[in-house]
Amino acid sequence: MDLLQLKDLLSNSGWGLIILLTLIQIAPIKINPWGALLKFLGKAMNAELNEKMDGFKGDLQGIKKDVATLQTDVTSLKDDVTTLKSDVVTMKNDINGVGGKVDKLRYTVDENEAKQARVRILRFSDEILNNIPHGDEHYAEILRCCDSYEEYCMAHPTFKNSVAVNSIDEIKKSYEEHRQKRSFLEQNSLNNQKEN
């Protein structure tokens, strides 16, 4: 066989192959050579597109996982907010409790200051009754003490004050007498007494 004959055979056999494949496709046999050929060619032509689609599918799966994680985080944040709200309510209750304790402490401190003022008033009254002289400034200070003591007693009617009432009257009366007579102990004589 020479080259020309081979060429004729191949060209004739090429047409023969096409006719044979067409007949096989038409025949009731389940072989589909054209479909297989087109499928192969389609895969080859769309390989790049299929790779991109596979990448998109992977990205979509990643996004779905991220959304699920975000939903979990949101649920966790909601729980944290609920816990914080509960903590705030507890703190408010604690603050109210502390506020009550502060008020009680303030009341106790004020009462102690009133008792100390009463002691100073009683001592000053005793000194007046024992004729111990006092200066103008000393009287001014004890009168301020008497005023704050009387204000406390008016604001707290349950506070017992029966002892200091007479002493305050005695101090005020003595102050008026010394003021009218201008007979307060002078500061110079106090300094002289301290030096001796």
Image (tube, rainbow, N blue to C red):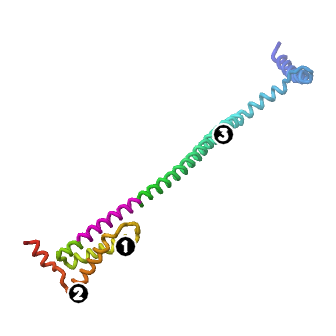
| Three-letter code for the amino acid on which mark 1 is drawn | Glu
Residue 180: image tag? 2
Do the residues bearing badges 3 and 2 touch, measured as CB atoms within 8 Å? no
Element at label 2: helix
Please identify the dominant SS of the magenta region. helix
Q: Is residue 140 magenta?
A: no
Question: In the image, is 97 to the left or to the right of 12?
Answer: left
| Three-letter code for the amino acid on which mark 3 is drawn | Lys
Q: Provide the residue span drawn in magenta.
A: 104-123
Distance of label 3 from label 2 (alpha carbons)? 98 Å
Q: Is residue 122 magenta?
A: yes
Residue 64: image tag? 3
| Three-letter code for the amino acid on which mark 2 is drawn | Gln
Identify whether 45 is placed above or below 194.
above
Element at label 1: helix
Discs 1/3, front: 1
Quadrant of the rendered structure where residue 134 is?
bottom left
Q: Quadrant of the C terminus?
A: bottom left
- The residue that disc 1 covers is 151
Residue at the bottom extreme? 180
